[in-house]
Amino acid sequence: MPYFLRKIWNDAIYQGKGKRRSYFEGWYFKIINAEENEIYAIIPGVSYNKDGKGTAFIQFFNGIDAEMTFFEFDISAFSFSKKKFVAEIGENYFSSDKIKLNLSSEGKEVKGEIRFSDLIPWSEKKLSLGVMGWYKLVPFMQCYHGVLGFDHPIEGELTIDGKRIDFSDGKGYIEKDYGRSFPHYYIWMQTNMFEEEEVSLMASYAKIPWMGSAFDGYLVGFRHNNILYRFTTYTGAKVTRLQLKDKEIILHVTDKKHRIEITASKAKAVNLASPIEGSMVGRISESITAKINVRLVKLSRKNQEEVVFKGTGRNAGLDIGGRVEEIKEII
């Protein structure tokens, strides 16, 4: 299969070959050790501004201490495979199987290897457009999103500033974004740390430019008992409640068969770099130690409701970016 077709059916593969202006692409690896006292997000990517100047980068985010280190590289340090997901930045390696880090700058040193197995993507079909659905085929979207691993075990270790950290029997999550800019406003959340095993959630809500106008789009995927419940704009689901409070965000999304109720409690956050017309000059507030209460309700024609799942996700990712003050609440 040629590269231009392969990347359509595989979100993980680098999508930006030949793009040199107003373009970014980045992967997001979240790792948590078994004791849940070491939580990190590693974000490698590339950035091209509107004049074509490129740079490669790796953001290293310590969730417990809410600290971020931005490692910058010359764009020549970046390479990728056209056959499968493999990306390299200098001596750092990223794939669906593992990451290898050899970072040193600004008094921060990170070295080691983390291995992944049994990744659960948005869809396990070989020919799948992923979380974006048919929107992935629209050529002028501002930002594209991919969920590469909802929930998977991790092994390996990192040495951070001389401290060795064992990630054996830990958990991971992998996703990616690419395009020109992050949305005008958006909310993103993720967790796979519930009391019940093999439960995971990813949800986002954002303003999407569309043919001279814009609309609010949303993507919610909730995995429970090996079933992925999808609530998205393109599946016909509707947001039935949305509130942004000082300390929490409430989001309810409903389709013909189910309603998912999400309440995300904010936690200590850090400012991560985000793309604006390709340049990593924007800032978003992200926490990876938030909590998310989830309730999944099965609906019936007789106006009866059955609670399918109720639980709280720990060590959750929670992003709030852009002009969220413009979001119209639905109560």
Image (cartoon, helix red, strand yellow):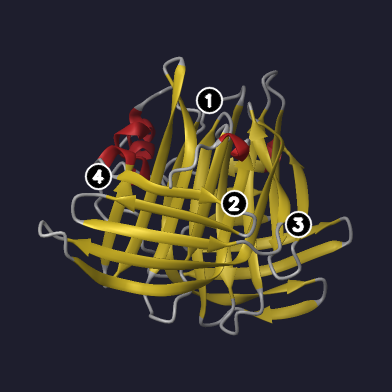
Badge nearest the viewer, 3 or 2: 2
Mark 1 residue type = Gly
Any mark on residue 68, and which? 3
Query: Image point 66% across, 79% down: which residue?
Result: 37
Question: How far is the residue under mark 4 from the one under mark 2?
Answer: 30 Å
- Looking at the rendered structure, the secondary structure element under dot 1 is loop
Mark 2 residue type = Asp
- Looking at the rendered structure, the secondary structure element under dot 3 is strand
Position of the N terminus by quadrant:
top left
Q: Position of residue 65 (x, y in %)?
A: 76, 68
Question: How far is the residue under mark 1 from the one under mark 4?
Answer: 24 Å
Q: Position of residue 60 (x, y in %)?
A: 71, 58
Q: Position of residue 215 (x, y in %)?
A: 42, 29
The answer to whether mark 3 and mark 1 are in CB contact below 8 A is no
Q: Earlier in the sequence, mark 4 or mark 2?
A: 4
Mark 3 residue type = Met
Q: Earlier in the sequence, mark 2 or mark 1?
A: 1
Any mark on residue 319, and which? 2
Q: Residue furthest left?
A: 302
Question: How far is the residue under mark 4 from the one under mark 3?
Answer: 36 Å
The residue to which callout 1 is attached is 18
Badge nearest the viewer, 4 or 2: 2
